[in-house]
């Protein structure tokens, strides 16, 4: 669980990832590639709903889960 | 450009190394095999980075203690790990190789690591899949694209699309730095061909005359070839050996046309393979490890009978070397970075297989022993 404070009430998912990178340098490149796209098999949930649009605004009080859906042999 | 040849090291006395260490990069992590100067008993240690795909691990010969490992961690993207204490502890690169934002290109994995010129401590080069060239000036902590290649107006024409190339993705490999001139470099690409720079990577030109490209409608192309592995001959950076998708070739600079050196291979074996390994001290000697490139390209030892082949005359003739290897029903092969030599006067030769075995010879390939088994699919072996 990570707590991050934002100046706006409903930050975008992009804002959240940027803030996460500030708190933990390097983590964003594990989640997004250099073109800003979520990496394959990385799933972001806002509450229970999967979300791939980084412009989506996060409602107050929402839980965000970032999950690496590991697969392969 | 003519460069002064270096003195041939074979004319000097070769001091026997006190130990040999093999860095074994695999599909599931990094292992190390080590021995003393007798090269009779080996100790396997590892894994490090268990579960990471490690494409290459390399020692910095300039300080003898910095190691870099190119890793791809499942779905968490590509990165480079660095050790400043010979592999005891590791730190991840702060800025791993990545294409410019807005370029639309994404590094799938770093495939090849080359320490820079002796006069440029801390400089490293990395080749990626898809084809990209990257440089670090701080020992692998931060990487930047070499714009002279990555943004070259001809790059796309040279390489084709990012979806073209080998089954594991198109690759930039065989980054060679001329030991006489830090600005003189070669790179090779599957696919794309071999390219040369005379200005430290600011500009590049193709160097593929004489190399076959049987898979193209025009067999005499300027670029678009598929070199699998290109290496300097021992002590002579004016000589390059190449194992190509379509044969074996040698280039003696300043000539720009490669010579076909595959005609001496038996027709039943052919001249397809991945690695090309020059002798550490003799510019006329090199090893290859042929694979089956017929029919649908099974990429296994021809007939299930693995063997290395060695030339002692610059590629005119090749001798089969299989003593100690399985005589039948062995369906593995050796990837392009997975064969190497040590620095002994009578060179040790080592290779790792797609079935996770490490084989070694302490008599220049006359006889072979299995040094380790049951490892994951081996991508690269470096002797350090």
Image (cartoon, rainbow, N blue to C red):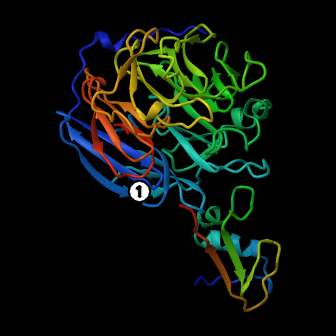
Q: Is residue B336 above or below residue A20?
A: above
Q: Determine whether B32 is above or below B303 in the image.
A: below
SS of the residue at dot 1? loop
Q: On the picture, is B110 further left or further right than B146?
A: left
Identified at 25% across, 24% down, the residue is B363
Relative horizontal placement of residue B69, taking residue B107 as reference (left or right): left
**Spot occupied by residue B164 in the image (x, y as percentages of width and height):** 72, 40
Q: Quadrant of residue A48?
A: bottom right
Frontmost residue, B367 versus B300: B300
Q: Position of residue B134 (x, y in %)?
A: 61, 40
Taking the image as shown, residue B381 lies to the left or right of residue B174, namely: left
Name the quarter where the C terminus of chain B is drawn: top left
Residue at the (66%, 37%) spot, across then down: B146
Residue B28 x/y as whole percent: 45, 56
Q: Quarter of the image holding residue B283? A: top left
Q: Is residue B307 visible?
A: yes
Q: Is residue B188 left or right of residue A10?
A: left
Q: Which residue is mark 1?
A: B90
Q: Which chain does the residue under circle 1 lie in?
A: B
Badge 1 density bin: few <14, some 14–19, many ≥20, Cα 10 Å: some
Residue at the spot 28% in from the left edge and 40% down from the top edge: B370
Position of B28 relative to B334 (above/below): below
């Amino acid at each position: 669980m990570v707590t991050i404070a934002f100046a706006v009430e409903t930050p975008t998912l992009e804002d959240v990832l940027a803030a996460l990178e500030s708190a933990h340098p390097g983590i964003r490149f594990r989640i997004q590639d250099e073109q800003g796209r979520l990496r394959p098999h990385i799933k972001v949930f806002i509450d229970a709903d999967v979300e791939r649009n980084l412009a989506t605004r996060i409602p107050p009080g929402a839980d965000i889960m970032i999950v690496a859906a590991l697969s392969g042999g | 450009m003519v460069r002064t040849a270096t003195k041939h090291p074979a004319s000097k006395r070769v001091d026997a190394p006190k130990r040999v260490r093999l860095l074994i990069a695999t599909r599931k992590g990094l292992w190390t095999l080590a021995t003393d100067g007798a090269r009779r008993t080996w100790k396997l240690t590892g894994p490090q980075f268990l579960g990471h795909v490690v494409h290459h691990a390399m020692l910095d010969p300039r300080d003898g203690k910095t190691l870099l490992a190119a890793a791809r961690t499942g779905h968490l993207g590509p990165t480079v790990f660095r050790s400043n204490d010979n592999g005891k502890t590791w730190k991840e690169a702060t800025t791993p190789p990545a294409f410019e934002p807005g370029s639309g290109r994404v590094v799938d994995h770093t495939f090849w690591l080359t320490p820079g010129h002796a006069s440029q401590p801390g400089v490293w080069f990395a080749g990626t899949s898809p084809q990209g060239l990257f440089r670090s000036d701080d020992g692998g902590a931060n990487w930047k694209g070499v714009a002279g290649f990555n943004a070259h107006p001809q790059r796309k024409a040279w390489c084709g699309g990012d979806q073209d190339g080998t089954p594991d993705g198109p690759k930039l490999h065989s980054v060679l730095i001329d030991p006489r001139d830090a600005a003189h470099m070669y790179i090779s690409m599957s696919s794309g061909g071999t390219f040369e720079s005379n200005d430290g990577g600011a500009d590049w030109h193709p160097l593929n005359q004489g190399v076959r490209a049987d898979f193209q409608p025009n067999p005499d192309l300027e670029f678009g070839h598929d070199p699998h592995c290109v290496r300097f001959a021992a002590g002579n950076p004016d000589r390059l050996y190449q194992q190509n998708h379509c044969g074996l070739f040698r280039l003696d600079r300043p000539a720009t046309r490669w010579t076909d050196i595959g005609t001496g291979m038996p027709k039943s074996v052919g001249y397809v393979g991945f690695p090309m390994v020059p002798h550490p001290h003799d510019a006329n000697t090199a090893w290859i490890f042929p694979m089956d490139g017929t029919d649908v390209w099974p990429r296994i030892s021809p007939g299930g009978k693995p063997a290395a082949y060695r030339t002692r005359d610059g590629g005119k003739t090749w001798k089969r070397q299989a003593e100690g290897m399985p005589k039948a029903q062995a369906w593995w092969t050796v990837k392009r970075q997975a064969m190497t030599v040590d620095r002994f006067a009578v060179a040790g030769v080592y290779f790792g297989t797609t079935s996770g075995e490490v084989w070694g010879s302490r008599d220049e390939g006359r006889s072979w022993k299995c040094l380790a088994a049951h490892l994951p699919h081996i991508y690269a072996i470096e002797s350090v």
